[in-house]
Image (spheres, grey):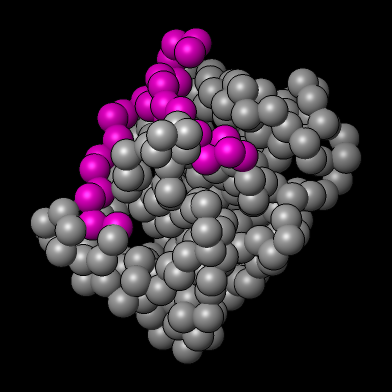
Amino acid sequence: MCRLFGSRSQEPERAARELVRAENALRVQSVAHPDGWGIGWYTNDSPHVVRSVEPAHADLRFTEESELLHAQTVIAHVRKASIGRIAFENTHPFQLGRWLFVHNGTIPNWERCCAAIDEQLEPSVRRALVGETDSERCAALFFSLLARRCDPQDAPFAETVFALRQTVALVRSASEPNAQEAASTTFLLTDGRAMVACRRGRTLHACVPAPGADGRVAWLALSSEHPHGNAEAGTAGHRGNWIPLEEDSWIGVDADLRLHRGSLDHAE
């Protein structure tokens, strides 16, 4: 189990409230998820990632990086190790090209299904693997599926969503037969322009304002837990209206900040 946060906005935004200042900020959540942290953001469409194996709540660098962040696209993660050692190479986000990927959940029957997932990976993606987590393999599977359909560095939004839904379906198919529990595949990913997340097996909350006349939203923010605990809408900064997403659903914004959402189980 882990915890994650992401935001995509029209204008550069600060994420310090959700990451370190709020009542239930990611830093607070890291007390129960102490096995490393990572933050990614984009400058001129180029991703930047900082990671550590230290607990976020005890690592001054996490606070410093969070307070300095001022970007249109941010993705962050705190880890509670389940599969794979506490190690830098097993710390999220996972990166391939301009894509960043984080995961909250665990894949059952991992020793049995890992080989089946590896068989689906593109050779170049398989060679890039450095850790042993189920999360990194899920990221690699998404990258591979996307690459088979388009140029992953310039992926249309519809292809991104298709690859995400296919990733969830293939992981379920490989891991759930004869398993005592379902695969928890709550994923969040971005290429700096689009951002998409899905909920399956773990909680996920979204905060998004009403679209403007042009159909665009000012931002989309996503968090495993409500960053402000039980705070009422509007009482904790401009991102106060957080709502839980339905199980087996996905939500995202395209490169133009137009909001899309749908079901993992049905084509949209």
Residue 52 visible, this orientation: yes
Q: Quadrant of residue 155?
A: top right
Residue 14 x/y as whole percent:
45, 70
Residue 200 x/y as whole percent:
38, 32
Left/right of residue 232 with respect to residue 48 in the rendered view:
left
Left/right of residue 110 with respect to residue 22 in the rendered view:
right
Left/right of residue 163 with respect to residue 154 in the rendered view:
left
Q: Among all residues in the image, which is located at the extreme bottom?
A: 60
Residue 76 x/y as whole percent:
50, 61
Residue drawn at 50 percent across, 85 percent down: 64
Q: Main secondary structure of the magenta part?
A: loop
Residue drawn at 69 percent across, 64 percent down: 43
Please say whether residue 261 is one of the residues in the magenta stretch.
yes
Residue 183 x/y as whole percent:
43, 32
Residue 136 visible, this orientation: no
Residue drawn at 32 percent across, 39 percent down: 210
Task: State the residue in front, 79 or 41.
Answer: 41
Magenta residues, start to end: 239-268
Residue drawn at 47 percent across, 65 percent down: 13
